[in-house]
Amino acid sequence: MKREKKTKRIKAVSVSFCTLIYLFLFLPISVIVVNSFNATKTKPYLSWKGFTFDWYIKLWSNSSLLGAFANTMVIAIVSTILATIIGTLGAIGIYRYKFRGKGIINGLLYIPVVIPEIVIGIALLTIFSKVNIPRGMITLILAHVSFCVPFVVFNVRARLAGYDKSVEEASMDLGANRVTTFFEITLPIMAPGIGGGALLAFTLSIDDVIISYFVNGQTKTYPLRVMESIKSGVAPDVNALSTIILLGTIVLVALTQSDILKKVKS
Amino acid sequence: MEKSHSKHEWRANTLPAMVMVGPVTLVLLFLVVAPLIFVGIMSLCKTDEYYNVVYDFTLVNYAKLISPDYLKIYLQSLLIAFFTTVICILLGYPFSYIIARTKSKKKTLLYMLVIIPFWTNSLIRIYGWRTFLGSSGWLNSLLMLLHITKEPVDMLYKTGTTILGMVYCLIPFMILPLYTAIEKLDTSLLEASSDLGAKPVKTLFEVIIPLTSSGIFSGSIMVFIPCLGYFFVSNILGGGNTDVIGNLIERQFKSANNWPLGAALSIILILVTLVLVKIYQKLGGDMDSLGV
């Protein structure tokens, strides 16, 4: 009897503790969502003046913000595709072939993961300016590829750990050549690892502030555009755009949920 | 005979290995190794009166690193990172323990709820905190509404606020490895411990925590190191009063325009990272648990 009471109490404490943590995690997001419907017109756009959709309508005429968002998406999509191809080939190649310098490559892959982003950012900035690559879209994409590739390699490699090479040998014995075998046998088996790696690369690219801040030149991404206006007070159309992006991501994930759930479980 | 064998070897091994590993090697060489080496070179360079980099050997940048102003900020930065890491462990450990031990189907949902907030850009979320804590923000409005205070309380630009922002940004990197470590924990060991008469507290400190220490170590690395560089958190919430090493570097590249000095400051961060990673490996940490 006493024990049952105690278990109940532990459970109540656990549930309330977790609820508080979730509140903490969601608090700044709810501020953004609520303020995107706030009818206030004066800086710093904080006090509640009633409900409105105005900021969503204003957003459509804010070409600099929408342009910055388009940049973010282009960079994320292009660098995810490049990083996924380079990372997948690399992971399979490193796993399968013996060659000199393999240990070095394996070690180098950890650098972008552990070194603070600011160091990667300024390192790329200095080398881009030394070899005179004008800073903009190209340098942003190169930078994003560089920090996404290791994460794709790690994801694909985790999948390779339980990989049975004999299916490839069987395919070749049955007359398929190396390239056909790669596309018809190896890739489909790797698909969940590749998908997980690509999703992670996309998320990292979209979330990046620090590295982009140093290599962007005049090309602004969406967070960089926000950074510029933070001191003077960010107009609520930024909140509207952030809310739309959040909803979009949740829908996207809900649609592809089965894959993600599998990934989380494994 | 010999020749055709080597030709076969080329087609069967060398060529495919080059095609597959070549691109990733190029990325690592040109976008990771070369830039970092170049930072090292730049840290030894001079600048002319217009702050252009002059490729002339000097140690003057390293001499500047030990100025008392800078030493104060290194210490402040290490303290902020330390407290952030400790708070992340104290909040993250029980939280991860509870969700990793949830038996129902809700478990996956609870896990996803940790990740969803991080799909909004970190800068935007930190801005959300600024809005919440500002003098006309929600928290102050609430406090005044409840007559707890008459005047808005100044909550921004304090070290505590910067630590709050750091904890907020970095806590998932503590929760995720802890969750993985706790999920692997064999429950029969806990039962054995309690069957043998150990009190819950004893079981916690002598069984549970030692067996999940790998999660604590990798989480701490993933929280402590980025914390030294997250200049935008202390910019937005600390407003220049709570600089971390990242702010010093950022200023050299974006406003003071002394790139060689910024490069020398970056070398400090690289060294700190290497030392911490070495300690992590000495403690038996696995590098692969650091990749998110």
Image: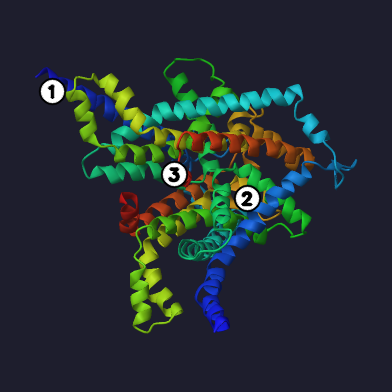
Chain letter for mark 1: A
Outermost residue on the right side: it is B49
Q: How is the image coloured?
A: rainbow
In the picture, residue A115 is in which quadrant?
top right
Label 2 marks which chain's residue?
Answer: A
Q: Is residue B193 left or right of residue B69?
A: left
Q: Nearer the viewer, residue B113 or B281?
A: B281
The answer to whether any part of residue A216 appears in the image is: no
Of residues A75 and A40, the one nearer the viewer is A75
CB contact under 8 Å: marks 3 and 2 = no
Q: Which mark is residue B289?
A: 3
Q: Which residue bears the numbered disc 2?
A: A212
Frontmost of labels 3 and 2 is 3
How many residues crowd mark 3 within 10 Å: few (<14), some (14–19), many (20+)? some
Q: Chain of mark 3?
A: B
Residue B94 vs A170, above or below: the answer is: above
How crowded pointer 2 is (Cα within 10 Å; few <14, some 14-19, many 20+) is rated as: many
Q: Is residue B279 shown to the viewer in this render?
A: yes
Q: Nearer the viewer, mark 2 or mark 1?
A: 1
| Kind of residue indicated by mark 1 | Glu
The mark tally for this picture is 3
B268 with respect to A246 (left or right): right
Residue B292: horizontal and vertical position, in percent?
45, 46
Percent across and percent down for residue B110 are: 31, 41
Question: Is residue A124 shown left or right of residue B211?
Answer: right
- Residue drawn at the location 39% of the way across and 82% of the way down: A176
**Structural crowding at the residue carrying mark 1, measured as other residues with C-alpha within 10 Å and reported as few (<14), some (14–19) or many (≥20):** few
At horizontal 42% and vertical 75% (from top left) the residue drawn is A183
